[in-house]
């Protein structure tokens, strides 16, 4: 028995006329009659009583009509669900992210994604880059939004989403605030607030080595993991800090941002979308399309 046979049966049962049912199904009447007889033979029961004047459902036919409608309805629901899964309109998306993403495009993207795809269960996990890579490998998240500097992403698909430069954050009372731009050489005697080296050794080394080309190594007096903490410590006068341009909107009163001359010697702040090579669900691509819409 196939769904086609159930559709033929329901059409005849609702029309109680083979001619009208055939028209409704866009087919000739003789093949329709043959299919109904084959269905009755398979079920080993009569579904209709036929005469020259009318067609009627038997008692078995009335019961089978209810079952057929239910089966066809559930089949249609399942078909729609599968189509929504294939288009990314239904399913789940577990997303890892870290601070640069939330400071730039992520909030607006998440809001629009939830509005556009209400049937997708979205879960968010704030994780550092190393944690995201581990979570991807363990299939605990589907997509990572991370700063990939210094990490081997050869086992993943990835897409560059965002690039920006560093600015210098310093207290408004600092003598260097009178400058519109600052040379790295002017920072030789400054105290620096930086993220711990253990958080990303490759990036930490790259930044410090950039200053070494000017003849000095930054004197780090305070570790800070988050950009908000970093800026609060700058405001408190503990030192100066390099922060991404997008962090400037987080600044408390009393912090000024100044461009750095020859900033190309410093690494850029890059944010990538990263996901496993062996999966490419449409839901990930839908999310990234919204990201790129906001970045445009």
Image (tube, rainbow, N blue to C red):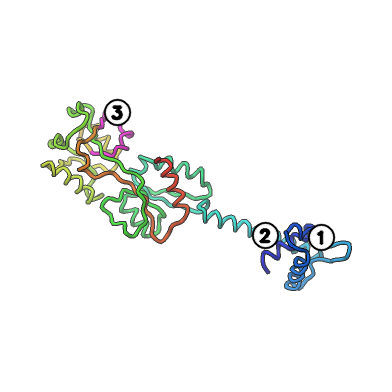
Q: Quadrant of residue 291?
A: top left
Q: Position of residue 277 (x, y in %)?
A: 38, 60
Q: Quadrant of the image for the C terminus?
A: top left
Q: Nearer the viewer, residue 43 or 272?
A: 272
Which residue corresponds to mark 1?
A: 17
Which residue corresponds to mark 3?
A: 253
Q: CA distance from mark 1 to mark 3?
A: 81 Å
Viewer-nearest of discs 1 and 3: 1
Q: Position of residue 14 (x, y in %)?
A: 78, 57
Which residue corresponds to mark 2?
A: 72
Q: Nearer the viewer, residue 202 or 235?
A: 202
Q: Quadrant of the image for the N terminus?
A: bottom right
First reached walking from the N terminus: tag 1 or tag 3: 1
**Residue under the image location 80 percent in, 60 percent down:** 19
First reached walking from the N terminus: tag 2 or tag 1: 1
**Residue under the image location 71 percent in, 64 percent down:** 6
Q: Nearer the viewer, residue 207 or 126?
A: 207
> Quick check: marks 2 and 1 in contact, CB under 8 Å?
no
Q: Quadrant of residue 267?
A: top left
Viewer-nearest of discs 2 and 3: 2
Q: Quadrant of residue 78?
A: bottom right
Q: Position of residue 147 (x, y in %)?
A: 31, 48
First reached walking from the N terminus: tag 2 or tag 3: 2
Whether residue 6 appears in magenta in the rendering, the answer is no
Number of other residues with Cα within 10 Å of mark 3, as a class: few under 14, some 14 to 19, many 20 or more: few
Mark identifier at residue 151: none
> Quick check: marks 2 and 3 in contact, CB under 8 Å?
no
In magenta, the rendered stretch is 242-257
Q: Locate residue 217 relative to residue 269 in the image: left or right.
A: left
Q: CA distance from mark 2 to mark 1?
A: 21 Å
């Amino acid at each position: 028995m196939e769904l086609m046979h159930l559709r033929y049966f329901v059409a005849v049962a609702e029309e109680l006329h083979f001619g009208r049912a055939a028209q409704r199904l866009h087919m000739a009447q003789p093949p329709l009659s043959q299919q109904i007889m084959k269905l009755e033979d398979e079920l080993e029961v009569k579904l209709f009583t036929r005469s020259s004047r009318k067609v009627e459902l038997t008692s078995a036919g009335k019961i089978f009509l209810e079952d057929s409608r239910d089966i066809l309805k559930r089949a249609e629901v399942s078909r729609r669900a599968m189509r929504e899964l294939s288009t990314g309109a239904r399913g789940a998306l577990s997303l890892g992210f870290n601070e640069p993403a939330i400071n730039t495009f992520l909030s607006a993207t998440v809001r629009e994604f939830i509005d556009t795809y209400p049937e997708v269960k979205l879960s968010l996990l704030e994780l550092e880059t190393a944690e995201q890579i581990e979570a991807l490998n363990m299939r605990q998240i589907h997509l990572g939004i991370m700063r990939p500097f210094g990490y081997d992403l050869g086992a993943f698909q990835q897409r560059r989403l965002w690039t920006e430069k560093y600015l210098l954050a310093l207290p408004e009372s600092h003598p260097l605030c009178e400058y519109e731009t600052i040379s790295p050489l002017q920072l030789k005697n400054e105290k620096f607030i930086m993220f711990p080296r253990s958080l990303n050794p490759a990036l930490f080394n790259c930044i410090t080595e950039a200053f070494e080309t000017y003849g000095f190594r930054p004197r780090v007096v305070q570790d800070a993991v988050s950009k908000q903490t970093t800026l609060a410590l700058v405001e408190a006068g503990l030192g100066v800090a390099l922060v991404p341009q997008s962090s400037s909107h987080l600044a408390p009163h009393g912090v000024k941002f100044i461009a750095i001359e020859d900033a190309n010697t410093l690494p850029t702040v890059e944010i990538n979308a990263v996901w496993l090579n062996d999966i490419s669900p449409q839901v990930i691509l839908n999310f990234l399309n919204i990201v790129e819409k906001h970045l445009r």
